[in-house]
Amino acid sequence: MQLKDYFEFLTPEDIRVKGTRIGIEHIFYEYVIDSKTAEEIAELFHTVSLEQVYATILYYLRDRETVGQYLENWLDYTNKAQAEFDRHPPPFVAKVLKWKLERLTQAEEVSK
């Protein structure tokens, strides 16, 4: 089996572990950023086998520059998306946040 056979290349920005909905960026994040072992990562993602985790790590180790850029692009995208969500939350989320703030304010007033 070739290393590339472990993955589904949907687009250049969307590579998944074959047979799962797990993007390789999630495994990279756990390995590179959170310094988790392959065994710990396999426990986090129940649809991914330990062999698939090792294949994903090997994919990263064979081409750190390209795969590192893939991870960096994903992190940049998710950070921008989170910032946009925080600036303009959906109406339901805004309503829940407002309700939560009101409850905290009420609790502070009661404790005075």
Image (spheres, rainbow, N blue to C red):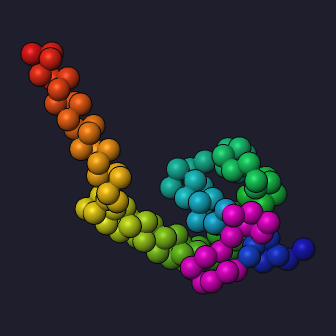
Q: Left or right: where does residue 82 sit relative to residue 65? A: left
Residue at the extreme left of the image, as rendered: 112
Residue at the extreme right of the image, as rendered: 1
Write the residue at 58% across / 65% down: 25
Q: Left or right: where does residue 33 sit relative to residue 59? A: left
Position in image of residue 30 (x %, y %): 58, 53
Residue at the extreme top of the image, as rendered: 111
Which quadrant holds residue 11? bottom right
How many numbered marks have been drawn onto this rendered protein structure? Answer: 0
Write the residue at 50% across / 55% down: 33
Position in image of residue 75 (x %, y %): 45, 66
Residue at the extreme bottom of the image, as rendered: 12
Residue 97 in sight here: yes
Q: Does the magenta stretch include residue 14?
A: yes
Write the residue at 32% across / 57% down: 91
- Where's the N terminus, which quadrant? bottom right
Which quadrant holds residue 96? top left
Position in image of residue 105 (x %, y %): 16, 30
Q: Does the magenta stretch include residue 84?
A: no
- Where's the C terminus, which quadrant? top left
Residue 58 in sight here: no
Foreground residue among 33 and 103:
103
Write the residue at 78% across / 60% down: 52
Vertical side of 94 occupied by 6: above or below:
below
Foreground residue among 24 and 81:
81
Vertical side of 31 occupied by 68: above or below:
below
**Magenta-drawn segment:** 9-21
Which quadrant holds residue 65? bottom right
Foreground residue among 2 and 106:
106
